[in-house]
Amino acid sequence: GENVEQHPSTLSVQEGDSAVIKCTYSDSASNYFPWYKQELGKRPQLIIDIRSNVGEKKDQRIAVTLNKTAKHFSLHITETQPEDSAVYFCAAAQGGSSNTGKLIFGQGTTLQVKP
Amino acid sequence: DAGVTQSPTHLIKTRGQHVTLRCSPISGHKSVSWYQQVLGQGPQFIFQYYEKEERGRGNFPDRFSARQFPNYSSELNVNALLLGDSALYLCASSPGHLRPLHYEQYFGPGTRLTVT
């Protein structure tokens, strides 16, 4: 069935370092890959997304890369700041004729940025 | 510009009772999705509605039902509550029209349901 695996489950970095979170998906029909940031007790916040016709997308300090052949996608955060500390979720959605709102989420990565 | 709103914020129910959760999407958005998030896990898809029609259903029992109203707001109903239904219930809205329904989903703050 559909599945998204996310690694690592926890990540601790020093302020100013880079952080990378990786996800793999099982459904080759997936064509949309959003990333969400969820701070403790708050809603998941869409921070960046990528569609299957694009290999990389950047927005200031965050970037996402997609390798459709390997069914991998990754989130890169550069120059990390303490306010980047949160749980990050990757997700994948099926395209084609399956036009539903179904996002399949990974298990989450708890990122801690140490000052 | 209001985001997605949900009510109530918190709810405590007893096993066997039923519950109704409410969601209002971002103005102009026509699609609403519901997700269940158990502590420490990613959200799990329950339903999606667009233009008052169910467009997707996740792997949840028939005790879970939903509907969407003409103003695009939505209700999630859960009957015969079980302890395992305790979770954060999230509503997400997306534009819906002129693009696949799963693009750009924005979440509300959620309703924290505790079943005792």
Image (cartoon, rainbow, N blue to C red):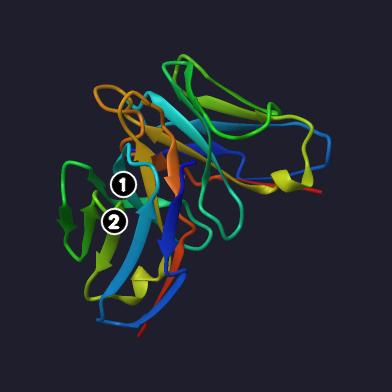
Which residue is painted at 35% across and 81% down in the image?
Answer: A13
Identify the residue under disc 1: A33
Position of the N terminus of chain B by quadrant: top left
Label 1 amino acid?
Answer: Phe
A91 on left or right of B88 = left
Task: Give yes or no for contact between labels 1 and 2 (Cβ–Cβ under 8 Å).
Answer: yes
Which residue is painted at 32% across and 32% down in the image?
Answer: A95
Query: Whole-percent x and y of residue A16?
Result: 25, 81
Q: State whether discs 1 and 2 lie on one chain.
A: yes
Along the viewing direction, whichever of A43 and A57 lies nearer the viewer: A57
Pair 1/2: label in front = 2
B62 on left or right of B99 = right
Query: Whole-percent x and y of residue A90?
Result: 38, 54
Task: Give me the chain letter of mark 1.
Answer: A
Q: At numbered mark 1, what does the secondary structure look like: helix, strand or loop? A: strand
Task: Give me the chain letter of mark 2.
Answer: A
Query: Whole-percent x and y of residue B18?
Result: 76, 31
Identify the residue under disc 2: A73
Q: CA distance from mark 1 to mark 2?
A: 8 Å
Mark with earlier residue (1, 2): 1
